[in-house]
Image: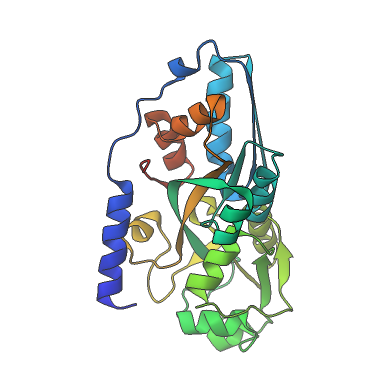
Amino acid sequence: MNRLHILSLSLLFCCLTMGTAPATTLKDFQGQKGTVNIAGGTAHIPVMKAAARSIMSAEPDIRITVTGGGSGVGVQQVGEGLVDIGNTGRALKESEIEKYGLQSFPFAIDGVAVAIHPANPVSGLTQEQLIKIFTGEITRWQDLGGPDAPITLYVREDGSGTRETFEERGLNKAVPSTNSNVSNSNGAMKTMIAQDKNAIGYVGIGHLDSSIKALPVDGMQPTQENAQNGSYIITRLLYMNTKGEPQGLVRLFIDYIYSKDGQGFIAAAGYIPKSKD
């Protein structure tokens, strides 16, 4: 990536994170009753659940359910009126907006990290190597300075926002090998990599922990700081989506995600809060 691109991304992310949060607080939920059902992107779940717990603890007559399923499920379920908020780890397609009349609310910046088993001595990859690995051109770890062992590929399911971000930005839109194993969530991907010494896959940076080993790509560490300043290129926004203009409790919940409390939940989950447009 050239310096102009890096500078452009840096300015973009600075603009995205500027501004102050709405003055929405738990007091705005006083006297409210009803339900809010949320589904979709699994990267969103820690933030959604933390906000839900905070609201329901303050107002017992409010019930908020949070489930995953991936970005594709989020679009489908909110579009068909099965949930109130459908979360995605990618921007909506024009066809989805037109079909369902959806509105998007980006609330956080996340990076997608390439990850392997902690016992694997490989300490970094170039983007060219990454593409060759996931397209099946490089099939053994010893070709990368690792052990004499085959590489086991793990990818996310079709419709996953994490997968779309990884393939677009990490693989330059190259198509992964059909020999890849498929995981249906960030949590499941992390577990699969942690249990397979020959594995390579990817998870949202907010999901990294000591059970897996994140790899630098082209020398850039996959950290939220590098995602924010644009030096780490495998990044995305996290979105809440509603069918039409949100009303009532759904509107309050979305505003709460942008509040000071919400920004705390986002940061605690390992993401970078984004101000409301």
Point out the image quarter for the N terminus. Answer: bottom left
Does residue 60 appear anywhere in the picture?
yes
Q: Along the line of sight, which residue is nearer the eye, 97 or 125?
A: 97
Residue 72 in the image: above or below residue 257: below
Query: Residue 181, image x and y in percent?
Result: 73, 70
Residue under the image location 66 percent in, 46 percent down: 79
Q: Along the line of sight, which residue is nearer the eye, 93 or 235?
A: 93
Which quadrant would residue 5 be assigned to in this image?
A: bottom left
Residue under the image location 45 percent in, 40 percent down: 266
Q: In this rendering, would 149 be left or right of 224?
A: right
Which quadrant would residue 72 be assigned to in this image?
A: bottom right
Query: Residue 81, image x and y in percent?
Result: 69, 39
The colouring scheme, among rainbow, by chain, secondary structure or one colour, is: rainbow
Which quadrant would residue 36 be assigned to in this image?
A: top right
Query: Residue 86, image x and y in percent?
Result: 61, 44
Numbered label tally: 0
Residue 1 in the image: above or below residue 113: below
Query: Residue 91, image x and y in percent?
Result: 51, 57
Q: Residue lying farthest top?
A: 31
Q: In this rendering, would 224 be left or right of 113?
A: left
Residue 67 in the image: above or below residue 26: below
Q: Along the line of sight, which residue is nearer the eye, 195 or 206?
A: 206
Residue 226 in the image: above or below residue 43: below
Point out the image quarter for the C terminus. Answer: top left
